[in-house]
Each structure stands twice: as C-alpha cells, then as structure tokens.
Image: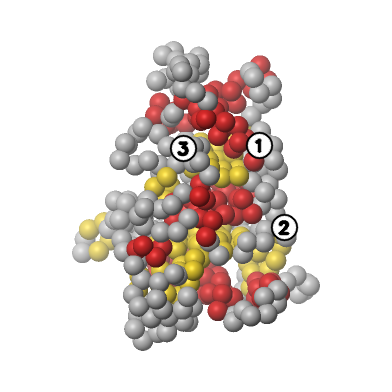
C-alpha cells in the first residue's frame, strides 16, 4: 500500500512538543520507548502458540503468581520484561511499578535516572490469551517528586489520578492500536505492520454522552450494592421500565477491550465495589488500571467514578490498591452516582433480584 500523509506517533509527539518551547524531549523519548514495548508485545501475542507462548508461566516446576495471587501467564512475564528492558536505559525514568512486581522497580545503577515514573499493567486481560480474545497493555506516566538519582519509594507513586502527565493503552486485536492522552484530548494510532510505525488514525476521540449499552459481570449480582442493582434492573426492564428504552449488555472480561468499545461508540462499564470479598474494596487496581483508563475516558468527554466519588480525586494508599470503578458515557455514570447519593432509608427491591428473580439474592 502507498504511504499516506498520516502522521506517525513520532511526528505527533514532535508537534505536541512544539507547544512547549522549554520542553527537553525527555517525555517524547519515554512515550516512544513505551510504544516500542507495545510493538514487541503485539508481535508476541500474534505468534501465540506458534512460539510456545500460551499457557502458565512455570519456574522450578511451579506455576508462578503475581502479588495479587493470580497465576501468571507466559505472556504476562514476557510483557513485563519488555516494558522494563525498553524503558530502563534511556534516562527518562526515576523508577517503574507494575502489576507483576510487588515492589517498585529501581533503575539499574549503570543507567542515568530521569524525572518521570512509569506505572503499567503489561498485559491486561491475560486470562483471555488462550481463547484468542483481545488483550492489551495499560500505562500511566507521573512526575517523580522525590530527589533525582535516589531510589524511588512506594510513596512516590501514590499520586491522585488527576496528577497524571499522560496515559494510554495498546490494544492487541484484529489490528494493534495505541490510544494516548497527554492531557489535551485523546488520539488513536494504528500499527502499520509493513512500516512498523504507529500511524495516527483517530483524532479527537469523543464518547457520546448517552448510551444503550452497559458492561458488568452479572455473576456477581448477589454481591452488588443496592444502587448498582437498581441501575441494572432499570436497564433490563427496557422500554417497559423507568428508562423507557432497550439496553444491550456486553462483557469481554478484558478492561482494555471494554474501554476501547466505549471510546469508539459509547457505553458504561462497571466493576463496582461489592461484598464478595470484604478485604478487597474492588477488583481493578487503582494506579495502573483504573487511573490511566479513567484519565483517557475523561479526556474523551466521558466520566469516571467509584460510584461514590470522582475516581481521579482518590488518594492512593498502596501500590497495588484495588477500587470499584464505573466509567463511560457521562450521563449514565452521573445517574449511577446519583443513585449512590440517595438516602438509604430502605433497601432496594426488584423482581429481577428477588428470591424467584433473574438474579437471585
């Protein structure tokens, strides 16, 4: 195919840098290093079992787990290594943190250290790898407030989502895409496999304020709080219910894929706080899943919340903190928030959640 006049990721970053005459190029270099890691992961995901990359990661005849106690896939470990090795050397980072590592990653002493922090989920949705469903990588870039040339501490990473410098994700599906925000809207790039370049294909992505699609894991319905039960019940009642319109339910179990669908056509995604495991106030990780996706969603005109408060205003308390998340089309998220703010004078009752209902309590 002939080369088009589309901008590459490099060209886009250069144009953005020109808005800030004092910029030193360090940020651009970091984003391009992240993009290189995503290209390598895309290639590994595409090869799959041809390269022996499906299945669990095993060391010393034992299946390995990450800090959350989840069994690691071969591609989880490989993807984490790609992120580390493409970003540790360039002098842009003070440190890194990942879903696959219990503690912050220190930049090796032979490399210079920079002013940014990189937080990432190297392969979101990895439980879907063996069934060939879309997966992705999520990343967040923060400024490091600590002293340069010293080891980073967990506290350096515990910043509100509103403090993010940039965030993005790569989606490994029928095409590989890189979605990016640097705080001035959201843009999307598609990987040209011939040129090996991310090409700008989606400018100024906007999420519709209204929707008729929602995504939630309905198997957890018996553990939901009353406001979520009410919202889902009203959606399922369709035209005959208070919403007076039909809704469709979607569930992929890969947050990157869920977020991408919402960016492209609207919708609302819910993995809310529930009572399934009182020790875990949510399923998703605040720093390297919820915050970067939330930043992207809000930059695209959507809304992100815990249901109880604005998610990007939450102060993290630990590196691997979990949290309940609701994001997507602004009007639907605002409705869900309003249900959480109503006085709890009486329990919510619906035939859908009753003893003989669709979602039995």
Number of residues whose C-alpha sits closer than 10 Å to that of mark 3, classed few (under 14), some (14–19) or many (20 or more)? many
- SS class of the residue under badge 1? helix
* 2 vs 1, front mark: 1
Answer left or right for 295 relative to 72.
right
List the residue tagged with mark 1: 331
Q: Assess whether mark 3 and mark 1 are in contact (beta carbons under 8 angstroms).
A: no
Residue 356, relative to residue 108: is it above or below?
above
Quarter of the image where one finds residue 231: top right
Residue 56, relative to residue 35: is it above or below?
above
Answer left or right for 232 relative to 245.
left
List the residue tagged with mark 2: 204
Q: Which quarter shows the C terminus?
A: top left
Number of residues whose C-alpha sits closer than 10 Å to that of mark 1, classed few (under 14), some (14–19) or many (20 or more)? some
For marks 1 and 3, give the CA distance.
Answer: 17 Å
List the residue tagged with mark 3: 272
- Disc with the residue nearer the chain's start (2 vs 3): 2
């Amino acid at each position: 195919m002939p080369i088009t006049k589309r901008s590459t990721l490099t060209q886009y970053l250069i144009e953005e840098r020109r808005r800030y005459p004092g910029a030193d190029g360090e940020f651009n270099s970091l984003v391009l290093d992240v993009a290189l890691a995503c290209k390598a992961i895309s290639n590994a995901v595409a090869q799959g079992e041809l390269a022996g990359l499906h299945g669990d990661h095993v060391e010393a005849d034992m299946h390995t787990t990450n800090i959350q106690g989840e069994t690691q896939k071969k591609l989880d470990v490989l993807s984490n290594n790609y992120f580390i090795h493409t970003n540790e050397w360039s002098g842009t980072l003070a440190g890194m943190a990942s879903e696959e590592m219990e503690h912050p990653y220190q930049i090796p002493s032979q490399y210079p250290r920079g002013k940014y922090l990189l937080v990432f989920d190297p392969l979101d949705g990895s439980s879907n790898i063996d069934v060939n469903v879309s997966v992705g990588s999520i990343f967040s870039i923060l400024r490091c407030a600590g002293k340069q040339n010293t080891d980073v501490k967990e506290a350096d990473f515990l910043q509100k989502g509103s403090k993010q410098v940039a965030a993005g994700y790569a989606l490994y599906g029928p095409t590989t895409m890189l979605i990016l925000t640097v705080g001035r809207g959201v843009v999307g790039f598609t990987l040209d496999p011939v040129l090996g370049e991310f090409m700008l294909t989606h400018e100024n992505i906007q999420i519709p304020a209204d929707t008729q699609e929602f995504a939630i894991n309905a198997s957890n319905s018996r553990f939901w709080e009353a406001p979520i039960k009410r919202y889902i019940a009203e959606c399922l009642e369709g035209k005959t219910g208070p919403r007076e319109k039909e809704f469709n339910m979607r569930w992929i179990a890969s947050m990157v894929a869920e977020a991408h669908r919402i960016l492209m056509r609207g919708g609302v995604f819910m993995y809310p706080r529930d009572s399934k495991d009182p020790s875990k106030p949510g399923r998703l990780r605040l720093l390297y899943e919820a915050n970067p996706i939330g930043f992207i969603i809000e930059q695209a005109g959507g809304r992100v919340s815990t249901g109880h408060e604005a998610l990007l205003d939450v102060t993290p308390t630990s590196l691997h903190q979990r949290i309940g998340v609701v994001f997507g089309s602004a009007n639907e998220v605002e409705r869900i928030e309003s249900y959480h703010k109503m006085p709890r004078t009486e329990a919510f009752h619906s035939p859908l959640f009753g003893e003989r209902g669709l979602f039995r309590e």
